[in-house]
Image (cartoon, grey):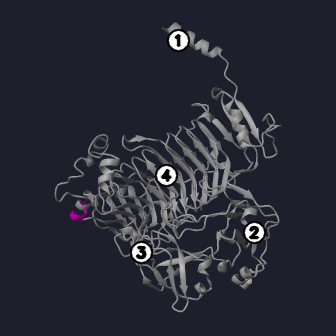
Amino acid sequence: MQVCLLAIALVALSVPALPETVVHVAPGGDDANPGTRSQPFATLERAREALRRASPDGGRRVIVRGGVYSRSATFVLGPEDSGVQGRPAVWETPPGERVRVQGGTTVREGVFRPVTDGAALARLKPEARERVLVARLQDLGVQRPEPFPDSFRGAPPGPELIFDDERMRLARWPNDGWATIERIVDSGSNPREGDRSGRPGAFVYSGDAPTRWKPDAGVWLQGYWCFDWYDEFLRVASIEVATRTIRFAKPHLYSLRQGNPSPRRYRAINVLEELDQPGEFVVDAIAGLLWFWPPKPLGGARLVVSTLDAPIVALRGARDVVLRGFTVECGLGDGIEVRAGERCAIESCEVRNLRRSGIRVEGGAAHRVEACDIHHTGTGGLTLAGGDRRTLTPARHEALNCHIWRFSEHQFTSAYGLTFGGVGNRAAHCRIHDAPHQAVAVGGNDHIFELNEVFRVCTETDDCGALYKGRNPSCRGNLIRWNYWHNIGSPMGHGNAAVYFDDGDGGDRVIGNLFVRCGEPGRGPFGTIFSHGGHDNLAENNVFVECKRAFGSAPWDEARWRDALRGGQECFWIEKLRQEVDITRPPYTERYPELVGFLDPPPGAERVNRARRSVLVRCGEQANGNWRVDAATTWVTDRDPGFVDAASGDYRLRQDAEVFRRVPGFEPIPFDRMGLRDDGPRRRLKGFQRAP
C-alpha cells in the first residue's frame, strides 16, 4: 500500500501545473486585441469570454486598468466563470488605479442649457432663475421614467445625478429638517387594519410655502404620518389656500394620526418651486425634463446620470470568484449582487451613490465581503442571507472589516446598514454609522455580530434600536458579542435603544459589549438593551457608561402571550413556528431545549430576561420590567472603573482596574480589537482613515 501511494505521489509531481490565464482590460483597449498587458481588451464581456476558454484548474485572472466602465446592463459572472477551491478566478484592479464600474452615463458638455421657458421661470424663485439649468431626459440617456405613484416607500423612481462623486438631491422643502403638521383634519382610512374605503387624509399646514406649489404638476410629501418608525411618500391631491389645508390622493398605510408623542413631520420633494439651492434637481417625468442647479460650474466637473435599474455587477451561481479593488457606483438598483454559488469574495471595493442598496449576498455558502466601503445608498448597505432555517444548516457568509455609513438616504426607516437572514452568518470588525433609523437587522438563527463599532444611528426616529430583532421566537441562538456602541438615540417620545428585542423575541445573548451614551427611555420603558414582550435573553459581562437606563423591558401579560400563541398580536406565530419551521421537533428542540413546550406553556410560566456581571458607570436607572439582574455580580458606580483614558475615548481596562475586584468573574472587554482594522485589504482602499 505504501508503495502504491508513493507511486501516485510521484506521478502527481511529474504532471506540470497548468499555467494561470491572465487577461487585461483597459478603457483604451480593443476587443479585437489578444488581451495582453500591451494590447488589452476594451470590455469586461470580452475578458469574460476569453476566460471561459481557459481551464479553471490553472487559475483565471482579469486585470482591469483604471478608468470608467459604464454599464447599461448587469455584468454577470455565472457557473461557467468559476474558479476552483484554492485557485479562485480573480477580477482585480492594479493597486493605486481607480476603476469605476458605473450604472449610468457621463453627461457630455452642452446637454444642460439655461431655462428659457416662461412658465418654468415663473415657478422658480427669483434667485434660482439664472442659476438653474435644464436638459431633456432623452439627451441624458434616460428613458422616460414612470411618474411617482400616489403612495410609495423607499427610493423615488427616476434618474439620479452624481456630481464630482457626490449624490445630488431632489429639491425639497424645507431645505433642512422637517415641517410639522399644525392640525389633522381627517385621518383618512387605515389600510393596515383592513379599512379598504380608500379615504385620503388631510391636515392644516403652517407658513406660506405650500401656497406656491402646483398639485396638478405633481407634489409629493415624505413624512412620518403616524409613527416615527415608518416614513412614506404621499401625493398631494389639493391645497386649499384659504383654510391652509392639504388633502392627499391616497391614505397613509396607518392613517394620518398621532401614533407617537412627537409632532407629525413632513417635507415636500421634487417641487420646482423649491429648487432654490446648489446641488438640487427636479425630474418632470411627464414633460421629459430635468432641472438642475449645479453646485459649481459644469466645465471640468464629472457629472453622471444613474440609469441602470438593476444590479451593476452580479455573481449568480458562481464558485470561487474574487472581485477586488473596484468602485461600483451610480446605479438605480443594487451595487453588487451575489446569489447561490460558493466561496466568492468581494474585497477592497467601494460601493456608493446607489438608489437602493450596496451589496446583497443571498443564498449559497461561504461567501465573504471584506474591507469594503459601502456608503451613500438609498435603502440599505449590506445583506448577508443564506442557510436553511428548517434544518438549521448555516451558510457561513462573512462580512469582515467593512465600513458602512449613510445607508438610508431615501427610505429613512427599516433600511439597514447590515441585514442578517437565514442561519449561521457572521459580521466582525465593521464600522456602521450615520443613519436616521436602525443600523443592524437580525433575522434567523445562530448569527454572530462581534467586534464591531456602531454609532450615530436612531438619530431622528422613535421606538427603535441600533440593532433590531423581533416578532419571531423561532429566530434565536444569535450572539451579539464584543461590540462598541456609542452616541445612539435621540430624545423622542416612546424611546430608543442600542439593542432591541421586539414583540416576544428571545433566545439570544448580548456578551461583553461596551455601551457609551446609548438609548433614550423617552416616556416609556426603553433601556440600552430593551425587550418588548420577550424572554430568555441573556446579557452578560457588559459595560454601560452614561446610559439613562441599562436594561429596559415592556413584558407581556399572560393574556397577551396566549393570544400571540394562538396567532394574534399581528405576530402570525402559527405560520412562523409550525409551518415555516417546526419548533416542536428536532433540530429545533435539540438546538434550543427551551423551546420544548413553548407553544403550550403552563399557566403562570415565568418569562424573564437575565443579566449578570454588569458594570454601570454614571448611569441612571438600572433595570425595569422582567429583567432579572444578578445583584451579586452587578457594580453600579460613579467612579472610573479602571479605563485607560476614557476622556480621550480609550475604554480599555487596565490590568489593575477596580472592576476586576468588584465584579466576580468579570472578563476584560477587548476594546482594542473592536471596529475597523488597518490591514492590507483595507489599506488598498484609497483615502482610508481611522475612526475619530
- Based on the displayed image, in which of its 4 quarters is residue 29 positioned? top right
Residue annotated with mark 2: 135
Q: Secondary structure at mark 2?
A: strand
Identified by mark 3, the residue type is Ser
Specify which label sits upstream in the sequence, 1 or 3: 1
Of the image marks 2 and 1, the number of the one nearer the N terminus: 1
Q: Which residues are magenta?
A: 557-561
Residues at discs 4 and 1 in contact (Cβ within 8 Å): no
**Amino acid type, callout 4:** Leu
The residue tagged 1 is: 5
Q: Which residue was labeled with disc 3? A: 255
Q: Which residue is mark 4?
A: 451
Which quarter of the rendered picture does the C terminus lie within? bottom right
Q: Position of residue 658 (x, y in %)?
A: 40, 59
Give the CA distance from mark 1 to mark 3.
Answer: 75 Å
On screen, residue 589 versus residue 674, left or right, reads left
CA separation in Å, label 3 and label 4: 41 Å
Nearest-to-viewer mark from 2 and 1:
2
Q: Position of residue 232 (x, y in %)?
A: 50, 70
Mark 2 / mark 3, whichever is N-terminal:
2
Could you tell me how far apart the alpha carbons at marks 2 and 4 are, in whole angstroms? 48 Å
Where is residue 515? Give x, y as percent. 44, 62
